[in-house]
Amino acid sequence: MKLYEYEGKEIARKYGIETPRGILATSVEDVAKAYRELNTGTVVLKSQVLVGGRGLAGGVKKASNLEEALAKARELFSMSIKGERVEKILVEEAVCISRELYMSLTVDRATRKLVYLASGMGGVEIEELARKHPDKILRIPVDPFIGYSGYMARQALGFLGLQWDKLGQLDSIMRAMYKIMMDYDAELVEFNPLAYTCDGKLTALDAKIIIDDNSLYRHPDLQPLYGRDATSYEKIAKQLDFNYVELDGDIGVISNGAGLTMATMDSILHYGGRPANFLDIGGGATRERVREAVKIVVTHPRVKAVLVNIFGGITRCDEVASGIIEALSETRVVKPIVVRMLGTNEEEGRRILIEHGITVYTEMDEAVLRVIQLVREVS
Ligand code: GDP
Ligand code: MN
């Protein structure tokens, strides 16, 4: 679960990390009030959305007087960033930046350790930095039996090219990051940029904290926030108790059982396709459940073609087939759909689908190759 920048900064401040003074606004009037209250010349208006890369998308704007601040606030409030409407703006005093650094603490799954990532090239997204300048990123693994240790700040200080008199500040920031990571069961604590200001201070200009959802039972105060970053499709799926996950490709996937669903995804990737989402209808799904499942997957705007991969055990192929047909006629969406099914009531299922012009495969590879081909044809 991602936290908003203003929430991340609140936590950072609680742990002694400096951030610019800022006030959260949910309306243009709020922005006016915040501007007066901050009583500083230039402010930065930062749209609060859970997607990354706001800066590039025009979601971070500077204003040097009240009129300008209001005009830009209006502009921001009417914006959507990567599909997310701007409903909150963090109004902050502008900071004079000398250098933009990158500092994060995250989980390295390969080594099963936490790792600090530091870079002197902050401000750009870390994924991009890792691609273009992997040598500009310092990785400091953290031994879980030892935790944070002072040498890490010394190592980072040298790599970042900061003077020795900054060691105390960097040390307390990195120590605080470790504490936040532990206290909040975070997967990521990231400051990008961590600014080295013109007056020689280290300030978190941006904050991104991701909480491990599996730990929410230990954080009753965070539980109400769960699910707010779900897309509208994920919310509907959750209400209907489907396992549904969105990805960034263009093939919709419906399958039954976690194992077959994962195998389907692997197979699509293996043959060069990219799943847009996947939905596991679980065991013994009725035609009504299948209908709702297909509706979710097929109506998603990124989906160009759908692959249904069913192994009928308790699940009956004829129920699945009827569900598919009902969903297609109710949504009136015309997207190619490829079905691979076998097992219980296979013949009846196949008959229903063929009657409606849908080809049914028994081999998974054939179905996967077919759906990839169809996506290429409509692209
Ligand atoms: P992101 O694009 O979503 O990561 O948004 P950030 O909060 O990181 O802001 C993007 C960029 O805006 C930063 O890298 C800075 O260059 C700039 N920026 C943000 N706040 C300030 C500020 O107070 N003063 C100045 N001069 N630049 C700022
Ligand atoms: Mn940033």
Image: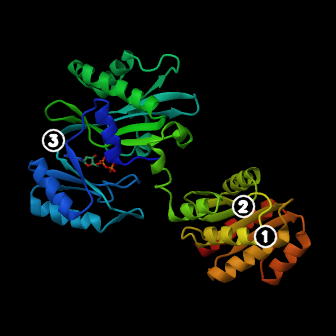
Mark 1, secondary structure of its residue: helix
* Quarter-of-image position of residue 181: top left
Mark 3, secondary structure of its residue: loop
Mark 2, secondary structure of its residue: loop
Q: Position of residue 73 (x, y in %)?
A: 22, 62
At 41% from the left edge and 62% from the top edge, which residue is drawn? 82
Q: Say if 249 sits above or below 377 in the image.
A: above
Q: Residue 281: give its label.
A: 2
Q: Are marks 1 and 2 in contact (CB under 8 Å)?
A: yes
Q: CA distance from mark 3 to mark 2?
A: 53 Å
Residue at numbered disc 1: 320
Residue at numbered disc 3: 96
Mark nearer the viewer, 3 or 2: 2
At 85% from the left edge and 66% from the top edge, which residue is drawn? 316
Q: Disc 3 marks which amino acid?
A: Cys
Mark 3 CB within 8 Å of ligand 1: yes
Circle 3: is it few (<14), some (14-19), or many (20+) Cα within 10 Å?
A: few
Residue closer to the observer: 272 or 16: 16
Which quadrant, please, contains the C terminus? bottom right
Q: Position of residue 123 (x, y in %)?
A: 31, 44
